[in-house]
Image (cartoon, rainbow, N blue to C red):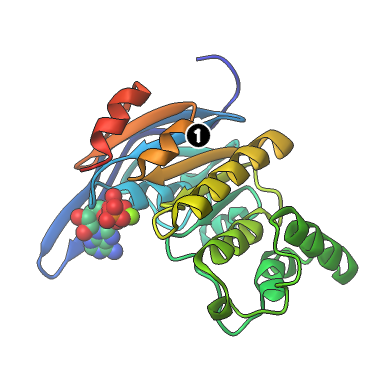
Amino acid sequence: MSGEVVVWTYDLWKVYRTPHGTVSALKGVSLSVRRGEIVGIHGPSGSGKTTLLKILAGLERPDRGEVVVDGYDLNQLDDNGLAMLRNTVVSLIPQDYGLIEDLTVFENIELPLLLAKVPREERRSRVMELIDYMGLRGRERARPRQLSGGERQRVAIARALANTPSVLLADEPTANLDYENAIRVLELFKRVNKDFGTTIVIVSHDPRVLRYVERSFIIRDGVLKEVPPQEALGSSSA
Ligand SMILES: Nc1ncnc2c1ncn2[C@@H]1O[C@H](COP(=O)(O)OP(=O)(O)OP(=O)(O)O)[C@@H](O)[C@H]1O
Ligand SMILES: [Mg+2]
Protein backbone atom coordinates (compact mmCIF):
# COMPACT_ATOMS: atom_id res chain seq x y z
CA MET A 1 0.00 0.00 0.00
CA SER A 2 1.50 3.35 -1.00
CA GLY A 3 0.64 6.82 0.32
CA GLU A 4 0.42 8.18 3.82
CA VAL A 5 -1.67 6.10 6.21
CA VAL A 6 -4.06 8.36 8.11
CA VAL A 7 -6.21 5.78 9.92
CA TRP A 8 -4.44 2.78 11.35
CA THR A 9 -5.55 0.16 13.81
CA TYR A 10 -3.81 -3.00 14.88
CA ASP A 11 -5.43 -5.95 16.66
CA LEU A 12 -8.28 -3.95 18.21
CA TRP A 13 -10.43 -5.76 20.74
CA LYS A 14 -13.53 -4.44 22.45
CA VAL A 15 -15.65 -6.32 24.96
CA TYR A 16 -18.85 -4.90 26.42
CA ARG A 17 -19.82 -6.14 29.84
CA THR A 18 -23.52 -6.08 30.66
CA PRO A 19 -25.57 -7.57 33.50
CA HIS A 20 -26.50 -10.33 31.04
CA GLY A 21 -22.93 -11.27 30.19
CA THR A 22 -20.16 -10.07 27.90
CA VAL A 23 -20.23 -9.27 24.19
CA SER A 24 -17.05 -9.26 22.11
CA ALA A 25 -17.84 -6.48 19.64
CA LEU A 26 -14.38 -6.36 18.00
CA LYS A 27 -12.02 -9.32 17.76
CA GLY A 28 -8.62 -8.24 16.54
CA VAL A 29 -9.47 -5.58 13.95
CA SER A 30 -6.55 -4.27 11.87
CA LEU A 31 -7.31 -1.53 9.35
CA SER A 32 -5.25 0.85 7.26
CA VAL A 33 -6.67 3.79 5.31
CA ARG A 34 -4.55 6.18 3.25
CA ARG A 35 -5.01 9.92 3.20
CA GLY A 36 -7.65 10.94 0.68
CA GLU A 37 -9.26 7.52 0.35
CA ILE A 38 -12.98 6.77 0.60
CA VAL A 39 -13.55 3.32 2.06
CA GLY A 40 -16.67 1.38 2.93
CA ILE A 41 -17.23 -0.98 5.84
CA HIS A 42 -20.16 -3.32 5.36
CA GLY A 43 -21.60 -6.00 7.58
CA PRO A 44 -24.72 -7.28 9.28
CA SER A 45 -26.41 -5.72 12.28
CA GLY A 46 -24.47 -6.20 15.49
CA SER A 47 -21.20 -7.02 13.69
CA GLY A 48 -19.24 -4.18 15.34
CA LYS A 49 -19.40 -1.35 12.79
CA THR A 50 -20.51 1.42 15.13
CA THR A 51 -18.13 0.21 17.82
CA LEU A 52 -15.21 0.51 15.40
CA LEU A 53 -16.23 4.02 14.30
CA LYS A 54 -16.61 5.15 17.93
CA ILE A 55 -13.09 3.94 18.72
CA LEU A 56 -11.69 5.72 15.64
CA ALA A 57 -13.52 8.89 16.74
CA GLY A 58 -12.13 8.67 20.29
CA LEU A 59 -15.60 8.15 21.78
CA GLU A 60 -14.81 4.66 23.08
CA ARG A 61 -11.57 3.06 24.12
CA PRO A 62 -10.47 -0.37 22.98
CA ASP A 63 -9.67 -3.07 25.54
CA ARG A 64 -6.59 -3.94 23.57
CA GLY A 65 -4.85 -2.88 20.36
CA GLU A 66 -3.45 0.18 18.67
CA VAL A 67 -5.29 3.07 17.06
CA VAL A 68 -3.57 5.96 15.35
CA VAL A 69 -5.52 8.72 13.57
CA ASP A 70 -3.66 11.38 11.60
CA GLY A 71 -0.52 10.75 13.63
CA TYR A 72 -2.23 10.78 17.04
CA ASP A 73 -1.90 7.60 19.09
CA LEU A 74 -5.33 7.60 20.75
CA ASN A 75 -4.23 5.26 23.55
CA GLN A 76 -1.74 7.92 24.65
CA LEU A 77 -4.37 10.64 25.00
CA ASP A 78 -6.43 11.34 28.11
CA ASP A 79 -10.13 12.23 27.85
CA ASN A 80 -9.34 15.92 27.28
CA GLY A 81 -6.92 15.00 24.54
CA LEU A 82 -9.55 12.86 22.83
CA ALA A 83 -12.10 15.67 23.15
CA MET A 84 -9.66 18.05 21.42
CA LEU A 85 -9.28 15.65 18.53
CA ARG A 86 -13.00 15.19 18.01
CA ASN A 87 -14.44 17.44 15.34
CA THR A 88 -11.03 18.88 14.53
CA VAL A 89 -8.91 15.90 13.44
CA VAL A 90 -11.67 13.29 13.21
CA SER A 91 -15.44 13.78 13.01
CA LEU A 92 -18.14 11.17 13.39
CA ILE A 93 -21.57 11.62 11.83
CA PRO A 94 -23.80 9.42 13.96
CA GLN A 95 -26.58 7.35 12.40
CA ASP A 96 -29.26 9.40 14.20
CA TYR A 97 -27.49 12.63 13.07
CA GLY A 98 -27.02 13.75 16.70
CA LEU A 99 -28.43 17.24 16.05
CA ILE A 100 -29.50 19.38 19.00
CA GLU A 101 -33.24 19.97 18.66
CA ASP A 102 -33.29 23.27 20.58
CA LEU A 103 -30.69 24.86 18.32
CA THR A 104 -31.21 26.17 14.80
CA VAL A 105 -29.43 24.77 11.75
CA PHE A 106 -26.97 27.66 11.98
CA GLU A 107 -26.29 27.05 15.68
CA ASN A 108 -25.88 23.30 15.22
CA ILE A 109 -23.22 23.84 12.56
CA GLU A 110 -21.60 26.59 14.64
CA LEU A 111 -21.25 24.46 17.76
CA PRO A 112 -17.90 22.76 16.99
CA LEU A 113 -16.49 26.18 16.01
CA LEU A 114 -17.59 27.62 19.37
CA LEU A 115 -15.96 24.69 21.16
CA ALA A 116 -12.78 25.30 19.16
CA LYS A 117 -12.94 28.98 20.24
CA VAL A 118 -13.09 30.32 16.70
CA PRO A 119 -13.84 34.09 16.77
CA ARG A 120 -17.42 35.20 16.07
CA GLU A 121 -17.02 36.73 12.61
CA GLU A 122 -14.96 33.81 11.39
CA ARG A 123 -17.60 31.40 12.77
CA ARG A 124 -20.33 33.24 10.92
CA SER A 125 -18.60 33.19 7.57
CA ARG A 126 -17.58 29.55 7.97
CA VAL A 127 -21.14 28.47 8.85
CA MET A 128 -22.60 30.39 5.89
CA GLU A 129 -19.98 28.88 3.59
CA LEU A 130 -20.96 25.38 4.78
CA ILE A 131 -24.66 26.18 4.45
CA ASP A 132 -24.12 27.15 0.82
CA TYR A 133 -21.86 24.18 0.14
CA MET A 134 -24.49 21.78 1.51
CA GLY A 135 -27.38 23.40 -0.37
CA LEU A 136 -29.07 24.54 2.86
CA ARG A 137 -29.41 28.23 2.07
CA GLY A 138 -32.70 29.55 3.51
CA ARG A 139 -32.86 26.83 6.18
CA GLU A 140 -30.37 28.37 8.63
CA ARG A 141 -33.03 29.45 11.14
CA ALA A 142 -34.99 26.19 11.01
CA ARG A 143 -34.90 23.68 13.87
CA PRO A 144 -33.92 20.09 13.10
CA ARG A 145 -37.52 18.82 13.48
CA GLN A 146 -38.61 21.16 10.67
CA LEU A 147 -36.18 19.53 8.24
CA SER A 148 -36.48 16.55 5.92
CA GLY A 149 -34.25 13.52 6.53
CA GLY A 150 -31.95 14.54 3.68
CA GLU A 151 -31.62 18.09 5.03
CA ARG A 152 -30.89 16.78 8.52
CA GLN A 153 -28.17 14.53 7.17
CA ARG A 154 -26.64 17.49 5.32
CA VAL A 155 -26.68 19.62 8.49
CA ALA A 156 -24.92 16.77 10.31
CA ILE A 157 -22.30 16.60 7.55
CA ALA A 158 -21.82 20.38 7.65
CA ARG A 159 -21.35 20.30 11.42
CA ALA A 160 -18.85 17.44 11.12
CA LEU A 161 -16.87 19.42 8.52
CA ALA A 162 -16.91 22.76 10.39
CA ASN A 163 -13.32 22.49 11.62
CA THR A 164 -12.11 20.77 8.41
CA PRO A 165 -11.15 17.42 9.97
CA SER A 166 -8.69 15.11 8.19
CA VAL A 167 -10.98 12.14 8.67
CA LEU A 168 -14.76 11.94 8.34
CA LEU A 169 -16.56 8.87 9.69
CA ALA A 170 -20.16 8.32 8.58
CA ASP A 171 -22.37 5.75 10.32
CA GLU A 172 -25.09 4.48 7.93
CA PRO A 173 -25.43 7.89 6.25
CA THR A 174 -28.07 6.74 3.76
CA ALA A 175 -30.07 4.39 5.98
CA ASN A 176 -33.04 6.69 6.44
CA LEU A 177 -32.99 8.35 3.03
CA ASP A 178 -34.93 7.78 -0.16
CA TYR A 179 -33.08 7.12 -3.41
CA GLU A 180 -32.68 10.73 -4.48
CA ASN A 181 -31.43 11.94 -1.09
CA ALA A 182 -29.13 8.96 -0.63
CA ILE A 183 -27.43 9.68 -3.96
CA ARG A 184 -27.22 13.39 -3.12
CA VAL A 185 -25.47 12.63 0.19
CA LEU A 186 -23.07 10.17 -1.46
CA GLU A 187 -22.25 12.71 -4.19
CA LEU A 188 -21.57 15.24 -1.43
CA PHE A 189 -19.09 12.91 0.24
CA LYS A 190 -17.33 12.52 -3.09
CA ARG A 191 -17.19 16.28 -3.52
CA VAL A 192 -15.89 16.85 0.03
CA ASN A 193 -13.23 14.20 -0.61
CA LYS A 194 -12.17 15.89 -3.85
CA ASP A 195 -12.37 19.51 -2.64
CA PHE A 196 -10.70 19.10 0.77
CA GLY A 197 -8.81 15.82 0.48
CA THR A 198 -10.83 14.49 3.42
CA THR A 199 -10.39 10.79 4.13
CA ILE A 200 -13.85 9.23 4.47
CA VAL A 201 -14.94 5.98 6.11
CA ILE A 202 -18.55 5.04 5.40
CA VAL A 203 -20.21 2.27 7.37
CA SER A 204 -23.25 0.90 5.60
CA HIS A 205 -25.63 -1.91 4.73
CA ASP A 206 -26.61 0.00 1.61
CA PRO A 207 -25.44 -1.44 -1.74
CA ARG A 208 -25.73 2.07 -3.27
CA VAL A 209 -22.70 3.07 -1.21
CA LEU A 210 -20.46 0.56 -3.00
CA ARG A 211 -20.25 2.65 -6.16
CA TYR A 212 -18.79 5.54 -4.17
CA VAL A 213 -15.98 3.80 -2.30
CA GLU A 214 -12.49 2.90 -3.48
CA ARG A 215 -12.02 -0.07 -1.16
CA SER A 216 -14.42 -2.23 0.79
CA PHE A 217 -14.18 -4.14 4.03
CA ILE A 218 -16.58 -6.63 5.52
CA ILE A 219 -17.01 -7.04 9.24
CA ARG A 220 -18.72 -10.10 10.63
CA ASP A 221 -18.99 -10.91 14.29
CA GLY A 222 -16.19 -8.47 15.15
CA VAL A 223 -13.76 -9.74 12.49
CA LEU A 224 -12.80 -7.35 9.65
CA LYS A 225 -11.37 -8.23 6.25
CA GLU A 226 -10.84 -6.39 2.99
CA VAL A 227 -12.83 -7.70 0.05
CA PRO A 228 -13.28 -6.93 -3.64
CA PRO A 229 -16.28 -4.59 -4.15
CA GLN A 230 -18.45 -7.35 -5.70
CA GLU A 231 -18.10 -9.47 -2.61
CA ALA A 232 -19.11 -6.57 -0.37
CA LEU A 233 -22.32 -6.35 -2.38
CA GLY A 234 -23.11 -9.94 -1.46
CA SER A 235 -22.87 -9.11 2.24
CA SER A 236 -25.00 -6.01 2.21
CA SER A 237 -28.33 -7.79 2.29
CA ALA A 238 -27.29 -9.59 5.49
N1 LIG B 1 -22.76 0.03 24.99
C1 LIG B 1 -22.92 -1.28 24.76
N2 LIG B 1 -23.12 -2.14 25.78
C2 LIG B 1 -23.25 -3.46 25.55
N3 LIG B 1 -23.19 -4.03 24.35
C3 LIG B 1 -22.99 -3.24 23.30
C4 LIG B 1 -22.85 -1.82 23.44
N4 LIG B 1 -22.66 -1.28 22.21
C5 LIG B 1 -22.69 -2.31 21.35
N5 LIG B 1 -22.88 -3.49 21.98
C6 LIG B 1 -22.94 -4.82 21.37
O1 LIG B 1 -21.77 -4.99 20.58
C7 LIG B 1 -22.06 -5.62 19.33
C8 LIG B 1 -21.65 -4.72 18.19
O2 LIG B 1 -22.50 -3.55 18.21
P1 LIG B 1 -22.39 -2.40 17.12
O3 LIG B 1 -23.32 -1.33 17.54
O4 LIG B 1 -20.96 -2.03 16.95
O5 LIG B 1 -22.92 -3.14 15.82
P2 LIG B 1 -23.28 -2.56 14.37
O6 LIG B 1 -22.54 -3.38 13.38
O7 LIG B 1 -23.07 -1.10 14.35
O8 LIG B 1 -24.85 -2.90 14.24
P3 LIG B 1 -26.02 -2.09 13.46
O9 LIG B 1 -25.82 -2.41 11.99
O10 LIG B 1 -27.26 -2.71 13.98
O11 LIG B 1 -25.89 -0.65 13.78
C9 LIG B 1 -23.56 -5.96 19.39
O12 LIG B 1 -23.71 -7.27 19.82
C10 LIG B 1 -24.08 -4.97 20.40
O13 LIG B 1 -25.22 -5.50 21.03
MG1 LIG C 1 -24.36 0.52 14.11
What x and y, as percent, mark residue 231? 28, 25
From the viewer's perspective, tell me whether residue 129 is left or right of residue 32.
Answer: right
What x and y, as percent, mark residue 40? 42, 36
Q: Is residue 175 visible?
A: yes
Please tell me which residue lies in front, 164 or 70: 164
Q: Residues within 10 Å of mark 1 (few under 14, many from 20)?
A: some
Please tell me which residue lies in front, 131 or 85: 131
Pick out the residue farthest to the top: 2
Pick out the residue farthest to the bottom: 102
Q: Name the residue at 77% across, 58% down.
A: 132
Name above or below for residue 10 compared with residue 174.
above
Pick out the residue farthest to the right: 121
Q: Name the residue at 34% across, 21% down.
A: 228
Identify the amino acid type marked 1.
Answer: Tyr
Can you identify the residue that label 1 sits on? 212
Pick out the residue farthest to the left: 20
How many numbered marks are there?
1
Name above or below for residue 164 compared with residue 66.
below
Q: Name the residue at 61% across, 80% down.
A: 143
Name above or below for residue 124 compared with residue 87.
below
What x and y, as percent, mark residue 169? 51, 47
For residue 123, which quarter of the picture?
A: bottom right
Image quarter for ligand 1: bottom left
Please tell me which residue lies in front, 183 or 173: 183
Q: Name the residue at 43% across, 66% down.
A: 96
Q: Is residue 80 visible?
A: no
What x and y, as percent, mark residue 175? 39, 55
Classify the position of the C terminus by image quarter: top left
Tag 1 secondary structure = helix
From the viewer's perspective, tell me whether residue 214 is left or right of residue 161.
Answer: left
Name above or below for residue 96 compared with residue 218.
below
